[in-house]
Every structure is written in C-alpha cells, then in structure tokens.
Image (cartoon, rainbow, N blue to C red):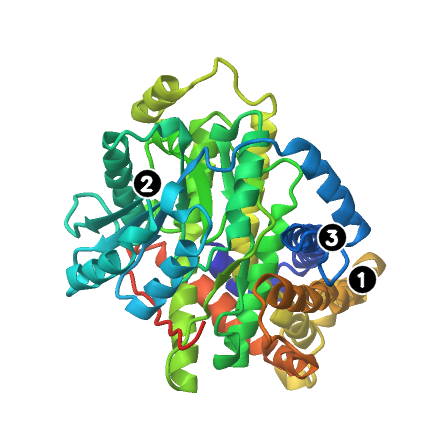
Amino acid sequence: MTALTSILLLPLGPLFMPRFYLVFLFIYFLTFLYTQISHLFKFYLTANKMIATIRRWNYRNSDGNYSTSPTPTSYSLINDLEASTNHNDTQLIHGFIVPNYAEPIALLRATIRQLANHKNAFTNYVIILAMEASEVDHEIKADCLNEEFKDNFLHFIVTSHPSDIPGETRGKGSNVAYAARQGCACLIQSGIDKKKLVLTVSDSDSSIPELYIKELEHSFFQADQPHSLLFAPPIFFSRNSFEVPAAVRMTDITWSAMVMSSLSNSRGLSFPCSTYSLSMLLAEKVDYWDTDADSVGEDMHMMLKCFFRTDGMARCCPIFVPINLTNVQTSGYLSNMNARYVQAKRHYNGVADLAYTLKKSFGVQSELDTALMVKERTSIYVSPHLATNKIIMCIKVMEAHMIPVTSGWLMFAAVPLMQFILFPPHSMVTFVGPEDNPILTSDFFCKLWNIVKIITLFLPFPLFGTLAIYEKLHRIIDRELYNKAQTRTWSNLLDYTSLPIAAWMFMTIPSTIACLKRLYKPNEQYIVSEKHLDSQ
C-alpha cells in the first residue's frame, strides 16, 4: 500500500488536504535528510576500517616493508591485533555454500578457484556446490567442477535441490536451505565437529579474498558468543565494472555504499548482503533457512530469523573486507539495462520481509514458533533491550524497502506538482482557489512551504559526499587488495550523469512494482540475470 499511497498523494494531497500534505512533506524530507547524513558518517567509518584492515594485511605480508605506509589508525590496529591474536587459524572448518542456477561454468570456476588459492583450502575448506535439479545438464556442470577441484579442498560436496518440494518458493534461500542441511549432514557423518563448522553463503560470482577468512576467524575467537553472530562483509563491484553501462555501474556502486554504511551500527543490528557467514550451531538452532514466499530476500531474512528466534540475542558482526562481485552483464546496451532491471525487481521482492518483521515484533506468535523458541533457546536470558531492538529492526526494514518506493516519487515530483496545483501558470488550469490555498492564507504554512523547498535542495548532498568518499575507497581496494592495474579514474566521474536514470529504472520503478504485486501476487517467478566473466 505504501507505493500506491505515495503515488496517489502527489495529486490528491495538494487538492484535498494541502495543510496535512505540507506537514507530511516537511517531516518526510527532514527525516530523509537526517537518515542520509547519518549514513554518510557511518559510511565514512566503514571506509576507514576497510582501508585499515587491507593495509594491516599488506603490511604483515610484506614483513613490514609495504610500500604504502599504514596510517596511524592502521598502526594501532596492528598493535592491538598482534597482542590479541594467539589462536590457531586452522581450528575452524569453513563450509562454502555456492548456490547457482543456470550460471556460466566459467563464473563458477573463477569463484571456486579463488577459494582454492587460499592457504588452508586443502585442510579446512569444504565446497558445497548447490545445484538446482531443474537446470538442464546441471550434473555435467557439477561433475566437471568436482573433478577439477576435488583435490584442492578437504571435501567437495554437490547437492541437487529438487524443484517439487511442497510449500517451497524457488530462489536462493530454498537452494541454500537444502544444501546446508545435506552438506552439514554429510560433514557430521564424516566426523567433523559441528562446533567448529562455519558456513559461508556466497553468490555464484562472489570472489572471497583470504583476508575475509582471517578476519572472520579473528572476530569469531574474540567474540563472547560467536554462535550468536552473523558475520557480514561489505560488497564491492569491480570484476567487470568497465564492461557494463554507466547506469548499471552506478546502481551497484550506490547499492554497495548503502551496504557498507549499514555495517557501522553500534548495536550490531544490520543486515548482510549477498555473502555472509554463521556457525552451523546458529543455523541449526534457528532451523536453517526459511523457504516460503516471505523469505525471498534470503540474506536479510536470515538475519531477521536469527534475531527473532534467539530472542534478540543474534547480532550482525561486520568483517571489513570487501567481497568482489560482478555486475549484471549481457551483450548489447539495451539488453544489459533490461537484465539489471529484472535483477532489481527480484531484489525488491524482499519487501515481504517487512510483513515478517512486523508480525514477529508485534503480532501473535504461532504455537509452532513459540515451541521452537522455547526448545532452541540456549540461555534463560533474552536481550535486555529486546523491545527497543525490535522497534529498531522494524525501522531498518522499513527504511530498506519503503524509502526506495517513496523517495523517487516524492523527491522528484512532490514539490513541482504542488507548485503547479497551488500556483497554476494559467487561470484555465486552476484547481485550488486562492481562499483555499493555505500558503496564501496562512503565514505559518507559507514559511513551512519555503522550508520544504529549501530542504529538498539539500537532499542529494549526503549522497554526493558518500560517492566522493567511495571514489577514493574504490581505488584503494582495487590497487591494494586485488592488485588491479585498471581502476576508476577522473574520467569515470561522467558516470554520475546517469544517476537519475539509475534511480528511476533500477530503484523507484522496480520497488513500486514489487510492492504493488504483493497485494495480489505473493509468489513471483525466479529469474536469474545473466552475468559474464571474460577475464579475472
């Protein structure tokens, strides 16, 4: 209903309730500006922590002779970590779940090869290649990859997710749920201690650096309750970014920036995106991943499920190491734009998480949910701030799904349309008489109208600040973590001219469609967007 309301408010607000509408716009735009400024500062913190983590890693690997001197922050982090890191980094067994459907084998090969190059891959890594039984010739693809990489890992497990399981909705979540159950059962049967098993869910194009595993292990052993944590890295798009349209590139840049800013949350109430890790004990405790129509956004949904099933004890632990992903890429400009649009529609189907969050926070729990929570609770305590944290979770989910569907319409059209209706250019198009125009009859509403117009001028500036910080961050990640010769340059600043197209085509329109479809069509066909990888 939010999408429909925001669209209807544009003409109906000035016509029938201009006073209320003015107050609403003032509150909405002021709140939006505050949240964007907050995200800017959080993004700045995340960016600094990412740079410090990367430079600490490079400083150690070069025996203190790293060419780019670590910053003062980096030196303090080095000293702190040297004093605290005494664990054996081979204690944990890492199970990498790689769900895929109709993905090119070259892409999967590059993803798995990246993991095979890690130091402890042969002794501590398990690949769980999650295939879909509905994919034609999926066995051939799986057998090929198994034969190529089976000697590089402790185990190489292939699962084939059936397409006819009752009650399931097709998507990444249902495939991951099946693969996790089958893979974990196989590993436990082979003698692996479930307490030492950490599951990392990735996308088929996730290039996971070894530094991520090192930082994950450090955070795991330093945590008081590691089995109540989801470990979430930032996402980064650099594998094929120069081979896609600028609008696609800018959409993914702003998306990754939003994910990065959310990680600097002092309460640990943030959401993983695309790639994340958790212990098998936590996955088992919450009964693995949900597979129904309300769990399409599997990454956010899993965090929400862990939070509610543990009575608010589960937290998201940021790992400040970027996971490199590929942009959606097809042959042809229009085809590529359409493929990114299809992907955006699929992403915004995660709006179902809003109803799930509201139900779990304020609704009546089913007998099954209550029984599972009592059975699976490992402590007699709950989070002391559970009620407050539930409200924060609701706000964060609403921000993630309601801002995209409302901001485009209101930011671009609310003020111009209200100006046109209340102050028409010609008497022939007069809709509201001067005596009914609160801006003309009330000094208060006249000042409020001017304030609203001023606020709208400042709304883009936090985004501009975020992107300015991102430009520097992108170059550092490319050169110092991934050792890439080609990175973003000043000429890429022209990409920003495509932001209005990207905002409407890949955010406002697909999020509006996703919200409207929830009113009559909760189940959506799962379509995978095409991705190419010509070079690493």
What amino acid type should be assigned to the residue bearing mark 1? Ile
Q: Quadrant of the C terminus?
A: bottom left
- The residue at the point 51 percent across, 58 percent down is 5
- Between the C-alphas of marks 2 and 1, the distance is 46 Å
Q: Position of residue 103 (x, y in %)?
A: 30, 66
Question: What amino acid does circle 3 point to?
Answer: Phe
Q: Which marked residue is nearer to the observer: mark 1 or mark 3?
A: 3
First in sequence: mark 1 or mark 3? 3
Residue at the spot of label 3: 41
Residue type, mark 2 in image? Asp
Q: CA distance from mark 1 to mark 3?
A: 24 Å
Rate crowding at label 2 as few (under 14), some (14 to 19) or many (20 or more) other CA atoms within 10 Å: many
Which quadrant of the view contains residue 374? Answer: top left
72 horizontally vs 495: left or right: right
Residue of label 1: 451
Classify mark 1: helix, strand or loop: helix
Against 47, is 476 above or below? Answer: below
Measuring from the top left, give residue 101's x and y in whole percent: 27, 61
- Tell me the quarter of the image containing the N terminus: bottom left
Q: Earlier in the sequence, mark 2 or mark 3?
A: 3
